[in-house]
Image: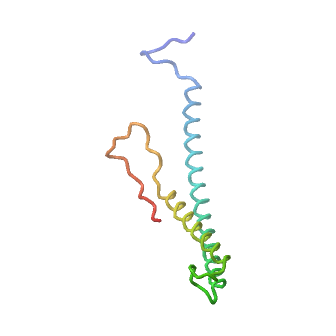
Amino acid sequence: MKHWTRGLPPTSEKCGQSSDALIRSKDWQIKNAKRRVVQIEALIMDLRHRLKLLESDIQLEEKGISDPKHINYPCVARAMRARRENLFRSIVELEYQLKKPPPVPFGTPPSQIRLAPAPDL
């Protein structure tokens, strides 16, 4: 049996392990967040590329009739326009996710809380 000195418990291997586990956990969270940022940025680039391709396809389909309200407007072009809007909204939402600040830890004073800007739609 070990005796305590100065009212403190003896140091044990478990205390060191818990701090090491906490450090590893924080490192993993940081690496995971960085990986997620890279994935989102790559996805945004891919969606922007698809948006450009879709725009050129819409222009090809609209040769002759470019007014979506016209009765003979191509159905394919109408569907492509809807797809283009969805891609654009997806890009805006992903960019908003990149700008969003991390969750606020419990107990943070309100004066130190930073709000994320609203996405532009």
Above or below — where is 22 with respect to 61?
Answer: above
Placement of the N terminus among the 4 image quadrants: top right
Hey, which residue is sitting farthest top in the picture?
1
Please give the count of numbered marks on the rendered protein: 0
Q: Does residue 65 appear left or right of residue 96 in this picture?
A: right
Give the residue displayed 47% in from the left and 55% down from the top.
100
Give the residue displayed 51% in from the left and 19% down from the top.
10
User: In which quarter of the view is residue 69 placed?
Assistant: bottom right
Measuring from the top left, give residue 27's x and y in whole percent. Answer: 57, 45
Above or below — where is 64 with respect to 29?
Answer: below
Question: Looking at the image, what colour scheme do you see?
Answer: rainbow
User: In which quarter of the view is residue 40 placed?
Assistant: bottom right
Above or below — where is 63 with respect to 29?
Answer: below
Hey, which residue is sitting farthest front in the picture?
71
Give the residue displayed 61% in from the left and 78% down from the top.
55
Between 88 and 109, which is closer to the camera in this rendering? 88
Measuring from the top left, give residue 90's x and y in whole percent. Answer: 57, 63
Between 20 and 39, which is closer to the camera in this rendering? 39
Hey, which residue is sitting farthest bottom in the picture?
64
Between 27 and 6, which is closer to the camera in this rendering? 27
User: In which quarter of the view is residue 116 placed?
Assistant: bottom left
Hey, which residue is sitting farthest right in the picture?
76
Between 5 and 53, which is closer to the camera in this rendering? 53
Give the residue displayed 43% in from the left and 15% down from the top.
7
Measuring from the top left, give residue 19's x and y in whole percent. Answer: 54, 33
